[in-house]
Image (spheres, coloured by chain):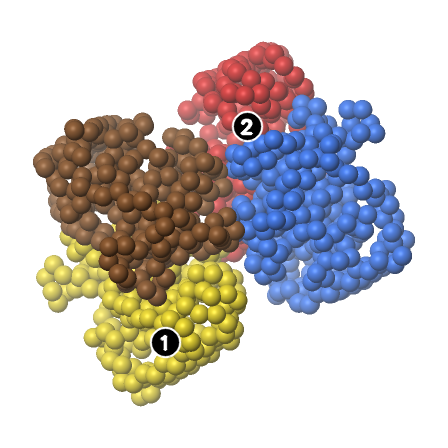
Chain colours: A red, B blue, C yellow, D brown
Amino acid sequence: MTIAISTRFDFTLDSPTDVILQFEAAAIPEQEILSARTVLTCGDACARVPAHEAIGERVLVSTQGRFEVAYDARVDVKRLTPDLAGLSQLAPHDLPGDPLEYLLDSRYCPADRLQSFAEDEFGGTSGGDRALAIRDWIAKHFTYEPGSSTATTTALDTFVERRGICRDYAHVLITLARASTIPARYVSCFAPGVTPPDFHAVAEVFLADETTPGGGAWYILDATGMAEPHETVKIGVGRDAADVSFLTSFGSSQFGDKTVTVTRED
Amino acid sequence: MTIAISTRFDFTLDSPTDVILQFEAAAIPEQEILSARTVLTCGDACARVPAHEAIGERVLVSTQGRFEVAYDARVDVKRLTPDLAGLSQLAPHDLPGDPLEYLLDSRYCPADRLQSFAEDEFGGTSGGDRALAIRDWIAKHFTYEPGSSTATTTALDTFVERRGICRDYAHVLITLARASTIPARYVSCFAPGVTPPDFHAVAEVFLADETTPGGGAWYILDATGMAEPHETVKIGVGRDAADVSFLTSFGSSQFGDKTVTVTRED
Amino acid sequence: MTIAISTRFDFTLDSPTDVILQFEAAAIPEQEILSARTVLTCGDACARVPAHEAIGERVLVSTQGRFEVAYDARVDVKRLTPDLAGLSQLAPHDLPGDPLEYLLDSRYCPADRLQSFAEDEFGGTSGGDRALAIRDWIAKHFTYEPGSSTATTTALDTFVERRGICRDYAHVLITLARASTIPARYVSCFAPGVTPPDFHAVAEVFLADETTPGGGAWYILDATGMAEPHETVKIGVGRDAADVSFLTSFGSSQFGDKTVTVTRED
Amino acid sequence: MTIAISTRFDFTLDSPTDVILQFEAAAIPEQEILSARTVLTCGDACARVPAHEAIGERVLVSTQGRFEVAYDARVDVKRLTPDLAGLSQLAPHDLPGDPLEYLLDSRYCPADRLQSFAEDEFGGTSGGDRALAIRDWIAKHFTYEPGSSTATTTALDTFVERRGICRDYAHVLITLARASTIPARYVSCFAPGVTPPDFHAVAEVFLADETTPGGGAWYILDATGMAEPHETVKIGVGRDAADVSFLTSFGSSQFGDKTVTVTRED
């Protein structure tokens, strides 16, 4: 499936400020970057470093005044979309070191506090069945409501208020998966079908990989139901939105306009 | 400086539960493990994996009932204790990829929310001077009060209430450093002089390394004033306490007794 | 039903501090104080004022050092215990002014944030049926666990963690009732059957009084199941625990011992 | 000083919902209502009850669809503006019962948590001097920034983030006053000079009334510096914004337009 992406956004910094940007499709085996073009208003210092888990890149900018970003790309997504039903989960002591970190609490996903709820609500299930049960429970009980959350909204806030946007849905899914001893991480992405069109976010859970004895793999889950794994273009991954925000500013910034267009080519 | 460590603790799990332990001195260049002995009640599965940043190890246990840990070690700490005054900080776009992650928000250290305060209170300083000013501000305004905080206490709670234990002091220091665009991480450790004797925690900040042009290094800072860098035995590092708790339990656990003895040998 | 009460507690104040105490059975029509004796270590200023809604009294003390409270009483509880099933709720515009205040958010009961959940979970019911459904839902999903909450724990914390003590159970019940547009208040009380023996707390909801056309009345509900309305001796009422804590200290205090004995005489 | 007020606002309710409105100048001795006209889209039930402390009125509406409010009034403010400097505070045991309640924690003003800070920062002062010191501290360290806070922002959030609007400034002032054992309440009001023009909020503190031995009185304080006491038209008072919001909705509502015009006539 080939996905065409086009995004424009700008922001203004009153004083010289450092900014981290992460907004480009990641070059990883499961998705091939057919073409890509990034244009930045980059007057001052501008660096690139590998992002979390070396998936995608962070653009580091130190600048002042108005800053514009334009990005266009075509990406061929080759991701398989296995059925999670019946997949087993790996006990923590069987996990590789890397996924283990995704069991721990993070800024927006304090999983320790939802252990009792997770056991009470999803106690009879495990592995892929549990992950699907969590996704379905969120989809059933939550309302997608742009404007109902802010940059400080945590998974607990959303759990209480039962509403939010893709970021919040992903945070709750991740938190309940971790509370179920399933490693889970946050994926910022592009996907067609997102309404209103915007950067999107989904969750990934680490479950047994049936093709490799003892092995595991990451599987995409979207509680909003808007993105399909075989059409999802990953930008980056992290413990939660704090790690892969498309704009992290170390100072005061005013956000301007933003347009995101994502279309299927085939 | 040779440090002798001895700790015993136990906990009880009502049902089969996965637990992560991290309680041993890390084998890293700046501290040599002269001798070490760990004895665990390890009836069931028990694995070891490298911990965060490959500093120290996590012990992964899946067990039930009473579990005892005994650990004795002698460690030669060879860490230098440079003066931080005058050290410059590296702009984010000059940072290597790894320290960059320590600018981002984590579970207990939501630095974005303290940016205004940090600028208001410490605005005239930067680099090592700023880190020292933050440490001194905490030392002046906070009260060390065992029992005043819990496992869910964040740096913001402590910032409001002005009291806590080593964990809380470290979280506030880390948060204010990050809010000042200085990478900062959490270090769990052993140190003589900790009163009452217990596992200890300090912060590390990433500043310019004057011996390497363009390079940087991690420097220990303890806002409680109880630990000296040249006597501090690191167990592990992380974004905050969520990454290097000596006991992380994925289920209900009752903590029993704990003794920690740390003495100087020379 | 005659209830015998005996309580002793003490606390220590390092420096001269103002303290509010509220620990005595309230003299109100539904419960007759047969006998009562209060002994206080009252060296300095000591005043009494009516408490919230003029139910019970607050003892105002300004003192330093160790302070002891001894209280013994026999109370004849004459409260009726009507069945709430089928009772209707009064729309806000039909409420008297006083109960109306108990629809609003308070320190530990931010009801606005649970409106979506309340509608989602209890949407098909109203009035007494809804209040009973809320009580039963809490009783089914929460675990009574002394030590699991603190003085800063809100109804939202408890809603997330699904555990707590009588105070927390009452806060969640009150919050969900208010989120259902049913006025609800907090009642501190004595009751036999409380395990472990301690001051107790229940909720009261304001529903139609079938004996008075257009009128309403307060009805006791205890989600912990430990107290029966006809055996419950009210100390005071408030919007939540902030209004009727048995000890409110305007400065640092160390709590000492506490014993509470409540027995049925008939 | 005669103040002319004109406000228009509207909101839309998707389904039949109960709403509390409080938006009119209160008829109290210190301000005379010269003329007033309220026009409501009041298709369904509409009641009026006295508001908190019998200051002003609450309009109770149960309705659906679009609802418009128009209010015009001329008010003669006769409030004195005494200098708070040097006024003493009343110890809790010398307070009347009513102001005592304004020492306790409320939804947005959890004063217990700022006791240490209040003592640390303002320890050398008391009474009116302390109230003024708190007001000046807020004015110096906080930034007035419309859009930086939401309906769930507490005084602790604002204390951490150092920015907000009139509501947030008042909440912090109230919280720090209570943490200093000075009763403090929230006043919703109209005032000329508010920029951008809107409903306004200030704090009131209860201090000794020098004209009455042993007596006390409420004094207006505005940390934003935008309103003068002799020009401030009170709408209502409460423990915090939860008690005197101009619009409290027990269900989902979409707010529409709002204009507020307040001018001096003399």
- Quickly name the residue at label 1: C191
Helix, strand or loop under label 2: loop
| Mark 2 → mark 1, Cα distance in angstroms | 55 Å
Foreground: disc 2 or disc 1: 2
Residue D115 lies, in percent from the top left, at 47, 54
Q: Is residue D15 or residue B131 the one in the foreground?
A: B131
Which residue lies at the image location 67% right of the left edge and 19% below the top edge? A47
Q: Quadrant of residue D17?
A: top left
Q: Is residue B19 placed above or below C79 in the rendered structure?
A: above
Can residue A174 be seen here? The reply is no
Q: Chain of mark 2?
A: A
Residue type at mark 1: give it: Ala
Q: Tell me: B243 left or right of C188.
A: right
Q: Is residue C64 placed above or below C158 in the rendered structure?
A: below
Q: Is residue D265 placed above or below C13 in the rendered structure?
A: above
- Quickly name the residue at label 2: A251
Q: Quadrant of residue D265?
A: top left
Residue C166 lies, in percent from the top left, at 41, 66
Which residue lies at the image location 31% right of the left edge and 27% below the top edge? D196
